[in-house]
């Protein structure tokens, strides 16, 4: 029996247990309270003197008479191909009144590192129907592309729209959604659940819910459970799994809480020094494996405290993920939906997913040209407020009005509007065709000859 | 030791496990000895000794290790295997071959031990020394033609010397003896070297040869010397990795060592897919044949990440010792520094700035100082160039890793998120970057391309002037500027768009030979001179800017037959300017 009643210290979510037989690092722990309640935890540090256990649930009620049971195993979760439609808690307990998952297999929730040599380069274009993403920050299968947002911005709407509309064209393939809520509010969770039920996404989805009212330490486990499920469905059953994780900032706050309780030396802004490595063990679980059918695509959402992208959470995320989609307060104020600011947004895998045979030959140069013209237009907007529009050269005035129409026709679209990639590109050409051909230095003469001045009228579309 | 380990109670046992750091009791080891931890024999390294306790960092996941598990000391420091078979290899941070590991499944299992160099493959060894010859450490006793274009010299390990009593050619594996010395030393095709110890050279020399990268902004404005050091700091999304990969593809070094240190898995895959397909412009063989890749992605264990830089630099030094030019790319040194920070924090060391250990600066300096152009032990000349990417937190260059790196590197390529946002690539800021090799490299460049140095200065002047003018424009608008200043802005725009911007994905533009760089600049400056003259003659700026030759010049970078094309462009310029200024004499090019 590896059960002990030797808790010596309790601080925050941590228990210090003494005089144990050898206990494994990261071992799964069950805590039996005198009142019959059970809680779960994990070994954070183990030595001959004492073992530090991190409790996932609230530590309320734990006292020195509490029994700590070491399972002898790492944390594993039951997985099964019949998990679709299930709603589970942040630590995998059924919330939908259904039975426990009948395990087909048990998987270590830490996941395993994919050998870089065994990965396949993601290069299949996912059409989200959103112009700013498809046209200029293309998402591909197996990518991890986060939404960088702020509180009060419609990032949930965008995520839902993507979940609803995402398709790989020319393929009616097995597509699944794993949704992972980390510390979000009741209302937000409701919004997601309603939408999933309405669109039928629940039937091809698995939901993990850790709400703001749930213990924060649980949040360390929730995304790992979700990703373990996603990997199982992808690599055992061949599904293309889109994993939405929101809100990653809450996850990092939970890490910070544990670090503080362990009295660790903090890194930047109080976050633990291993935040980068820890986040990488989540984000790097996206991908495609050579010789396996499915894929894991990640769409994490995080809110930047104070809209500050240099905050450690967005900063370190940006260094790990393959790009980022910026949700802008400025555009949101102007009533533009989706308020995606393309300039700081980026998809690193875009080039492998677009072009001839994938989207269209003109895609890359069109996108480059839109970027540079819009960037210049925005600079001029600042200038125009100081010196007035009339003081600008004719070229500058053209760029200025380009920036306006770019926001109003290319960025702006309806919440239900699902634009095929051709439409997105044609709107782009229509905008560029208002600039003189000579100014379009990013586009080769052959492409210009074929597309310049031929875009479909964009205005009639909105 | 031997007796101790048989008595289970007194043998080395785990005392404590905390993340990648394991404390072991009764381990009679030396600092940096490699130990095997637990039942799975996970590789680790002693990084501290405190009484009976030894502190070990483990290169693999320590999940389910527990107190009382056995530990074994190998008695050797962490070493790499050096010999034929290194090229085209893909290793993890501690030189385990990833393709071999992949044969056992797509995931990295723990406790895998596979030799870095194949033990079965036979190489054709050709001796160049004879029985009776006296050889010293660093001398070549023969060679193996490892690829069509690469002659792998078989070196006597440093510090070994003697008279050859036996040497034979033929097909050998890397562990078979090919040469015996009179003191009984047996030499194989392979040798081992501890990664944290620099390989000796006769002396180091001042670098004065340019490392041609084919990237216009680098070669023309901020050149790097063979044997030099460069830092590329930039916030995420500013193009660090693309720049590093461009350098790995096109730099004119004989050997490339590419370390993906704590970066994205998919990016490494990209390199793995792309490099075998790309062709080296000089040899016509796949680029992979001159490359050694070290891939330790961000989710692999941190201690192995810490080791990956040392593994890479030791391999680079080994090729240098044969008298070759080696370029090493480390992407990203910040992740390496973070690995140090993470381990330091587990050791509960007193932190320095931003939680980094106090020895951060000295470790970085140590690493970059292993670069250099050197006279090798056998008297040949070789070099190791180090190009390190830095990922400053929040894009703030004042953070410790960037600052400590800048102190020891001589070329600074500052990446700029603003440029990247408007898709100006490579997004290297021309006002902030610098190269301290400029003066050393200029004479030879000038000899090859007359006017190189002058033209470079002119270009920089125009760009600096643009920066001043932009500040004024932001206050008054560009229409308020006199026409000649408006022209300067236009010329600067031409330099930025026609010259500085380079498309890494365009088949021609991705690599720009020095001559082409020189000709484009000459053409831009020729246009500028004539434009200023035309302006003096009261011609309209707008007319000058809409000349056909300007549009032609914009496409020059995409032209393969650039000499012919730029010749035509210059001819067209002459015609164009003649037509607006009348028949007055124009300055010849």
Image (cartoon, rainbow, N blue to C red):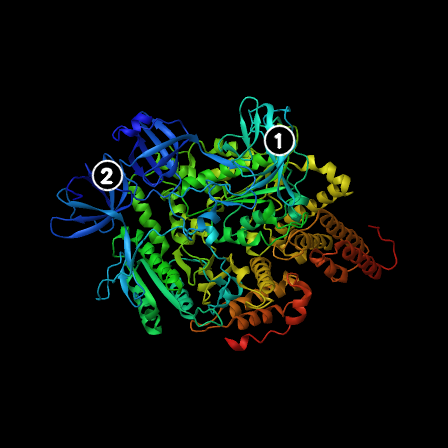
Q: Is residue A426 above or below residue B498?
A: below
Judge from the rendering whether residue B208 lies leftward or rightward of residue A9; answer left or right.
right
The local secondary structure at tag 2 comes to loop
Please report, as a chain letter, where disc 2 is located. A
Quote the CA–CA distance across marks 2 and 1. 54 Å
B399 horizontally vs A100: left or right: right
Where residue B441 appears, as percent x and y from the top left, is 69, 37
Q: Nearer the viewer, residue B320 or B532?
A: B320
Q: Which dot, 2 or 1, sits closer to the camera? A: 1
Query: Residue A62 location in percent, x, y?
Result: 16, 46
Q: Which residue is mark 2?
A: A22
Mark 1 lies on a secondary structure that is strand
Query: According to the image, label 1 marks what residue?
Result: B141
Image x and y of residue B394, in percent: 46, 47
* A35 sits left or right of A197 in the view: left
The N terminus of chain A: image quadrant: top left
């Amino acid at each position: 029996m590896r059960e002990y009643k030797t808790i010596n210290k309790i601080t925050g979510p941590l228990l210090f247990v003494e005089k144990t037989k050898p206990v494994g690092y990261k071992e799964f722990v069950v805590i039996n309270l005198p009142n019959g309640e059970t809680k779960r935890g994990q070994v954070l540090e183990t030595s001959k003197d004492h073992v530090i256990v991190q409790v996932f649930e609230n530590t309320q009620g734990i006292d020195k008479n509490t029994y700590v049971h070491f399972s002898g195993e790492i944390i594993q979760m039951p997985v099964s191909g019949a998990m679709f439609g299930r709603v589970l808690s942040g630590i995998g307990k059924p919330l939908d009144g259904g039975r426990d998952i009948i395990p087909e297999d048990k998987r270590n929730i830490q996941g395993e590192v994919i050998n870089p040599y065994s990965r396949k380069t993601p290069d299949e274009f996912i059409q989200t129907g959103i112009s700013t993403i498809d046209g200029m920050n293309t998402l591909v299968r197996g990518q991890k592309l986060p939404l960088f947002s702020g509180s009060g911005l419609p990032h949930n709407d965008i995520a839902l729209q993507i979940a609803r509309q995402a398709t790989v064209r020319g393929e009616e393939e097995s597509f699944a959604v794993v949704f992972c809520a980390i510390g979000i509010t009741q209302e937000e969770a409701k919004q997601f659940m309603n939408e999933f039920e309405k669109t039928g996404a629940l039937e091809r989805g698995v939901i993990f819910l850790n709400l703001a009212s749930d213990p924060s330490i649980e949040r360390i486990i929730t995304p790992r459970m979700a990703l373990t499920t996603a990997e199982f469905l992808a690599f055992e059953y061949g599904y293309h799994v889109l994993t939405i994780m929101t809100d990653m900032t809450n996850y990092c706050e939970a890490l910070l809480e544990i670090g503080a309780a362990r009295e660790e030396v903090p890194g930047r802004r109080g976050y633990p020094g291993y935040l980068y490595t820890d986040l990488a063990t989540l984000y790097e679980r996206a991908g495609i494996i050579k010789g396996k059918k499915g894929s894991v695509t990640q769409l994490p959402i995080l809110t930047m405290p104070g809209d500050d992208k240099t905050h450690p959470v967005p900063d370190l995320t940006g260094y790990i993920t393959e790009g980022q989609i910026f949700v802008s307060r400025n555009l949101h104020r102007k009533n533009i939906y989706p308020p995606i600011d393309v300039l700081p947004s980026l998809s690193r895998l875009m080039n492998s997913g677009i072009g001839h045979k994938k989207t269209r030959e003109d895609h890359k140069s069109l996108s480059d040209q839109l970027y540079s013209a819009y960037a210049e237009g925005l600079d001029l907007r600042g200038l125009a407020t100081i010196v007035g529009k009339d003081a600008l050269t004719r070229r500058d005035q053209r760029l200025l009005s380009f920036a306006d129409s770019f926001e109003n026709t290319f960025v702006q679209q309806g919440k239900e509007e699902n634009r095929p990639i051709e439409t997105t590109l044609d709107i782009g050409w229509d905008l560029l065709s208002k600039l003189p051909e000579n100014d379009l230095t990013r586009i080769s003469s052959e492409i210009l000859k074929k597309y310049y001045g031929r875009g479909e009228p964009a205005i009639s579309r909105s | 030791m031997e007796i101790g380990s048989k008595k289970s109670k007194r043998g080395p046992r785990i005392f404590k496990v905390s993340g990648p750091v394991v404390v072991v009791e009764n381990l009679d080891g030396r600092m940096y000895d490699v130990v095997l931890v637990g039942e799975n024999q996970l590789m680790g390294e002693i990084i501290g000794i405190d009484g009976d306790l030894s502190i070990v960092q483990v290169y693999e996941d320590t999940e389910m290790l527990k107190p009382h598990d056995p530990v074994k000391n190998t008695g050797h420091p962490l070493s790499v295997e050096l010999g034929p078979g290194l090229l085209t290899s893909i290793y993890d941070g501690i030189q385990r071959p990833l393709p071999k590991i992949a044969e056992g499944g797509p995931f990295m299992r723990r406790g895998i031990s596979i030799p870095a160099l194949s033990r079965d493959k036979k190489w054709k060894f050709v001796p160049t020394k004879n029985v009776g010859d006296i050889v010293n450490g660093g001398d070549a006793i023969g060679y193996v033609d490892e690829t069509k274009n690469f002659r792998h010299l078989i070196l006597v390990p440093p510090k070994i010397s003697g008279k050859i009593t036996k040497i034979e050619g033929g097909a050998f594996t890397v562990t078979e003896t090919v040469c015996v010395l009179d003191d009984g030393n047996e030499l194989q095709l392979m040798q081992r070297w501890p990664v944290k110890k620099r390989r000796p050279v006769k002396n180091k020399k001042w670098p004065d040869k340019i490392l041609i990268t084919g990237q216009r902004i680098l070669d023309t404005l901020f050149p790097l010397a063979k044997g030099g050091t460069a830092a590329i700091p930039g916030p995420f999304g500013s193009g660090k990795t693309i720049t590093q990969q461009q350098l790995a593809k096109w730099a004119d070094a004989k050997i490339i060592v590419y370390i993906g240190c704590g970066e994205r898995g998919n990016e490494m895959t990209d390199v793995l897919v792309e490099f075998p397909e790309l062709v080296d412009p000089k040899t016509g063989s796949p680029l992979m044949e001159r490359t050694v890749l070290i891939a330790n992605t961000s989710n692999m264990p941190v201690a192995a990440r810490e080791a990956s830089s040392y593994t890479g630099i030791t391999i680079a030094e080994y090729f240098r010792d044969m008298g070759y030019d080696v370029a090493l790319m480390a992407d990203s040194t910040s992740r390496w520094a973070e690995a140090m920070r993470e381990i330091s924090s587990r050791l509960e060391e007193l932190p320095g700035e931003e939680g980094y250990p106090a020895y951060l600066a000295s470790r970085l300096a140590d690493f970059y100082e292993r670069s250099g152009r050197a006279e090798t032990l056998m008297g040949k000349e070789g070099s190791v160039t180090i190009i390190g990417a830095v990922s400053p937190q929040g894009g703030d260059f004042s953070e410790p890793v960037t600052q400590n790196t800048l102190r020891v590197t001589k070329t600074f390529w500052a990446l700029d998120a603003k440029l990247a946002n408007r898709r100006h690539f490579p997004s290297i800021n021309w006002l902030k970057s610098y190269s301290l090799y400029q003066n050393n490299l200029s004479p030879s460049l000038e000899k090859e391309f007359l006017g190189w140095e002058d033209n470079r200065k002119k270009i920089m002047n125009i760009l600096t002037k643009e920066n001043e003018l932009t500040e004024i424009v932001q206050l008054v608008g560009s229409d308020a500027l006199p026409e000649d200043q408006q022209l300067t802005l236009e010329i600067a725009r031409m330099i930025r768009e026609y010259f500085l911007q380079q498309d890494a994905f365009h088949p021609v533009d991705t690599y720009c030979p020095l001559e082409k760089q020189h000709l484009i600049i000459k053409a831009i400056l020729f246009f500028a001179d004539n434009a200023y003259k035309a302006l003096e003659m009261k011609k309209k700026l707008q007319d000058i800017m809409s000349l056909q030759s300007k549009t032609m010049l914009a496409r020059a970078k995409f032209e393969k037959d650039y000499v012919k094309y730029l010749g035509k462009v210059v001819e067209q310029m002459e015609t164009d300017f003649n037509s607006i200024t009348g028949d007055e004499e124009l300055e010849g090019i």
